[in-house]
Amino acid sequence: RKEVEQDPGPFNVPEGATVAFNCTYSNSASQSFFWYRQDCRKEPKLLMSVYSSGNEDGRFTAQLNRASQYISLLIRDSKLSDSATYLCVVNRGSGAGSYQLTFGKGTKLSVIP
Amino acid sequence: GAVVSQHPSRVICKSGTSVKIECRSLDFQATTMFWYRQFPKQSLMLMATSNEGSKATYEQGVEKDKFLINHASLTLSTLTVTSAHPEDSSFYICSVIRPGGYGYTFGSGTRLTVV
């Protein structure tokens, strides 16, 4: 099993649609989780951290299920500008300030007018 | 936040030459910086962890004599690809831990093409 696994897509959705991405991770000792967004030929940019209680930032909602080792990202009311690749990122480092990030390959989203 | 500047953004070099990539932390001091490589349609792979004032820590399979890392100050780390070959063509990205410890901030990346 890959350390971080995502459906590569592409997901082609119309504007205004709701779309959900899933991610699974293999290391149960993983400490923290993130979703990053990467535009074509650009660097990744932090979209949001993922907390056990679930968290929301505007149209974006992230969920974490530690028992199933599963992370999700929900995007509501999709905009054209949401078109990008979404990277699931898992930190398996232990202890404060310890970072050993593993990146998924990403899920490509295309929002269509 | 954290602002990271990476230079150059794009470089084309001849096989056998060396290329230096700079990564600067502009608004805070970074004792640790990370160097990643990303091949097309692949995930980011950590190459090495750069530590200010000491030797870098390389990931398994990454040749330390080929990918030279220097972190001489708290704001600058450099990656030199020595004797570059076409298979070294990739997207190289540096990153630092965001102040407050929430994730990374990445440099804008360097697209290296070796011909």
Image (cartoon, rainbow, N blue to C red):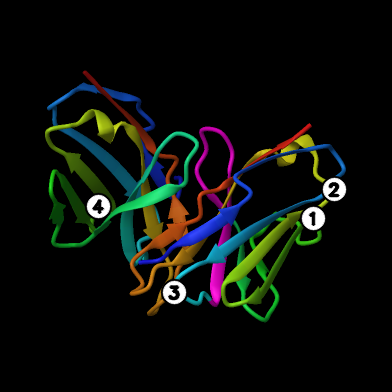
Q: Residue, x 83% and y 37% (percent of image)?
A: B14
CA distance for labels 2 and 1: 7 Å
Q: Chain of mark 2?
A: B
CA distance for labels 3 and 1: 27 Å
Instruction: Check disc 3 and report the residue beneath it.
Output: A98
Spot occupied by residue B33 in the image (x, y as percentages of width and height) = 55, 67
Q: Compared to B49, does A20 lie above or below? A: above
Q: Amino acid at mark 3?
A: Ser
Residue B44 vs residue B100: left or right? Answer: right
Q: Secondary structure at mark 2?
A: loop
- The answer to whether marks 2 and 1 mark residues whose Cβ atoms lie closer than 8 Å is yes
Q: Amino acid at mark 4?
A: Ser
Residue B68 vs residue A94: left or right? Answer: right
Instruction: Check disc 2 and report the residue beneath it.
Output: B83
Instruction: Check disc 1 and report the residue beneath it.
Output: B66
Q: Residue, x 56% and y 64% (percent of image)?
A: B24
1 vs 4, front mark:
1
CA distance for labels 2 and 3: 33 Å
Q: Secondary structure at mark 1?
A: loop
Query: Do tags 2 and 1 sit on the same chain?
Result: yes
The span shown in magenta is B31-46
Q: Nearer the viewer, residue B7 or A18?
A: B7
- The answer to whether marks 2 and 3 mark residues whose Cβ atoms lie closer than 8 Å is no
Mark 2 or mark 1: whose residue is earlier in sequence: 1
